[in-house]
Image (cartoon, rainbow, N blue to C red):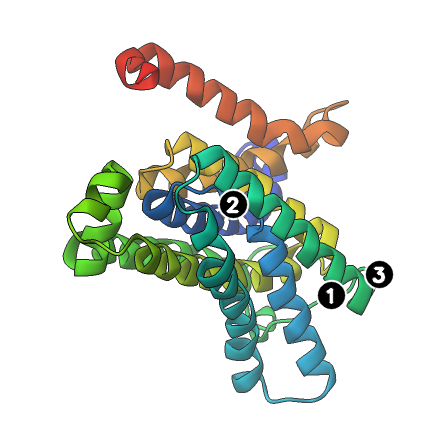
């Protein structure tokens, strides 16, 4: 193997792990968007709440078998609270208004997190950090493998939900025409609430993984949703397989950007560049659908 290729392998492995979490986050965003038409800007902040709850419970010596479900439950319940209380009041507003409202929710959650836990960066350790697969001097932890496996499994689970269940049928109906679905007797609010619950669970899992792979800091985790938005946009906010693939590619590209002289400090723009290129390609291939 060429020496240059060997040099890139650690970055590829690092990018694969973070890309898998981007993919998982993208799926959580797409599920909510397909059901309610809302781009959830609070996704990252909800993940941060999950990670901080896990850190606090571990500091109090709670057993790990209790910590991780409770941490995910925290983000799920907070997302459900928004979906059941605030989102219904905006149910009949346009998509832009409903999406921007989640930005306000994100700022509230972020403010509470920084007030309660402070701004200092921490490290969240997962049980899967201990074991790894070694490729010579390169170490691939089970956490990164778990991220990729979860991304694929949860994509398949959501695919089955959307195609094989009544709830999935209702979600697809709302995605096509919310007003007509309501006229036909579908409870828009109930379906939206279910989508918020699912999205909150995704946010919790992603928050735990990101806090481990990157760092546990509220602001960092809140804005880590941006690459996930890029993955969802590449998937045209509808295709789960393309969203997962895009998330992995974005993570790898972002990691490889470190190796480019003079570009390392700008590597955070990588998701935006890829999303912009994807939209340009889609516009060229599907001009009619884009215009509509």
Q: Residue at x 46, y 37 (%)?
A: 231
Q: Is residue 241 above or below residue 133?
A: above
**Label 3 SS:** loop
**Label 1 SS:** loop
Viewed as shown, does residue 137 lie left or right of 128? right
Q: Are marks 2 and 1 in contact (CB under 8 Å)?
A: no
Q: Residue at x 60, y 73 (%)?
A: 130
Viewed as shown, does residue 219 lie left or right of 20? right
Q: CA distance from mark 3 to mark 2?
A: 25 Å
Residue 258 visible from this viewpoint = yes
Q: Residue at x 48, y 50 (%)?
A: 25
Front tag of 1 and 3: 3
Give the image location of residue 218, x and y in percent. Answer: 72, 56
Q: Residue at x 51, y 21 (%)?
A: 276
| Mark closer to the chain start, 2 or 1 | 2
Residue tagged by mark 3?
A: 120
Residue tagged by mark 2?
A: 19
Give the image location of residue 28, x and y in percent. Answer: 43, 51
- Within 10 Å of disc 1 (Cα), the crowding (few <14, some 14-19, many 20+) is some
**Label 2 SS:** helix
What is the quadrant of residue 241 in the picture? top left
Residue tagged by mark 1?
A: 123
Name the foreground residue: 245 vs 198.
198
Give the image location of residue 46, x and y in percent. Answer: 59, 59
Give the image location of residue 47, x and y in percent. Answer: 59, 59
Viewed as shown, does residue 178 lie left or right of 235? left
Q: CA distance from mark 1 to mark 3?
A: 10 Å
- Within 10 Å of disc 2 (Cα), the crowding (few <14, some 14-19, many 20+) is many
What is the quadrant of residue 131 in the picture? bottom right
């Amino acid at each position: 193997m060429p020496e240059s290729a060997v040099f890139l392998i650690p970055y590829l492995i690092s990018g694969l792990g973070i890309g898998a979490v981007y993919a998982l986050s993208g799926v959580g965003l797409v599920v909510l968007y397909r059901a309610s038409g809302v781009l959830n800007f609070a996704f990252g902040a909800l993940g941060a709440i999950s990670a901080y709850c896990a850190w606090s419970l571990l500091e109090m010596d709670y057993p790990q078998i209790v910590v991780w479900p409770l941490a995910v439950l925290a983000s799920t319940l907070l997302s459900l609270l928004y979906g059941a209380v605030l989102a219904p009041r905006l149910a009949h507003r346009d998509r832009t208004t409903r999406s921007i409202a989640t930005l306000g929710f994100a700022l509230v959650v972020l403010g509470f997190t920084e007030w309660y836990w402070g701004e200092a960066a921490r490290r969240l350790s997962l049980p899967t950090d201990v074991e790894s697969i070694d490729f010579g001097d390169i170490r691939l932890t089970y956490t990164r493998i778990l991220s990729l496996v979860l991304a694929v499994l949860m994509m398949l689970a959501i695919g089955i939900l959307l195609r094989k269940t009544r709830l999935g049928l209702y979600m697809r109906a709302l995605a096509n025409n919310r007003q007509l679905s309501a006229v036909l007797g579908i409870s828009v609010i109930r379906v939206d609430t279910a989508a918020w619950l699912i999205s909150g669970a995704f946010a919790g899992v992603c928050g735990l993984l990101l806090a481990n792979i990157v760092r546990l800091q509220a602001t960092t985790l809140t804005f880590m949703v941006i690459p996930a938005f890029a993955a969802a946009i590449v998937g045209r906010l509808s295709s789960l397989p393309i969203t997962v693939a895009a998330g992995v590619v974005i993570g790898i590209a972002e990691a490889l950007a470190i190796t480019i002289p003079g570009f390392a400090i700008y590597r955070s723009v990588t998701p935006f560049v890829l999303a912009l290129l994807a939209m340009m390609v889609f516009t060229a291939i599907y001009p009619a659908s884009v215009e509509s």
